[in-house]
Image (cartoon, rainbow, N blue to C red):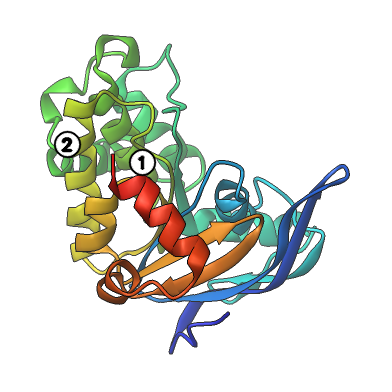
Amino acid sequence: MDNGAANPIIVCENVKKWFGDFQALRGVTTSVAEGEVVVVIGPSGSGKSTFIRCINRLEQHQEGRIVVAGIELTSDVRNIERIRSEVGMVFQQFNLFPHLTVMQNITLAQVWVRKRSRSDAEERAMALLERVGIPEQAAKYPGQLSGGQQQRVAIARSLAMDPQIMLFDEPTSALDPEMIKEVLEVMQELAGTGMTIVAVTHEMGFAREVANRIVLFDEGQIVEEGPPSEFFANPRHPRTKMFLSQILSH
């Protein structure tokens, strides 16, 4: 399946991935246009997290092609580094350095990878902490923050590298319900700026409001994809109908 994106910034062609004997991705073909917000949904073990982890080479695909921002993902380390510098990733676990302050977490890679001066990096970090709504937490350590605040720091840290693309792998699933909203609001604001986003999430309200396209994975394949209005109102595939009836009845 291919949505035929006009200016694709991510192109996946017949992507296959195995873990030992288990085939996690069974020939995934899709593309994401620049500035598009794609929400990936599906049952546990359907391959959706593996799919987005392949986009920045946290997992290595064994067959097919993945091209990100015009660079093909091969085993060439230079290509992987170039792609990672264009792609920000936010995980379910916040992956912050516990021994560094919020400010240090956000400036570290800016100074080392982007070669910014410390003062420029700190200025960028403060602007991003304002943007995600927690400038007053700059001097604290991750352990002093709530889960929702930590996840917003993780988003700010990714944005500090000026990525073209943001990948979110179930960014709210480790959070308490009252914290989910604050993280989704930041993601929604990002989507409004024209950032290209691919998000694996169970948050159907977010998917409905913010996504340009919903993609349903099942058993390592894309079962159905389409704009939210169509996807939720007139799902074509029986598997989609079943999945939506389970998830929307909660």
The N terminus lies in quadrant: bottom right
Quarter of the view holding residue 223: bottom right
Separation of disc 1 and disc 2 at Cα?
31 Å
- Residue position for label 2: 182
In the image, what residue type sits under mark 1?
Ser
Q: Residue 61, position in %: x, y?
A: 75, 57
Tell me the element at label 2: helix
In the image, what residue type sits under mark 2?
Glu
Residue 117 numbered tag: 1
Q: Which is more N-terminal, label 2 or label 1?
A: 1
Of residue 2 and residue 119, the one placed in the foreground of this image is 2
Q: Residue 191, position in %: x, y?
A: 24, 61
Which is closer to the viewer, label 1 or label 2?
A: 2
Of residue 209 and residue 8, the one placed in the foreground of this image is 209
The C terminus lies in quadrant: top left
Q: Residue at x 26, y 10 (%)?
A: 144
Q: Residue at x 42, y 25 (%)?
A: 96
Is mark 1 in CB contact (under 8 Å) with mark 2?
A: no
Residue 64 numbered tag: none
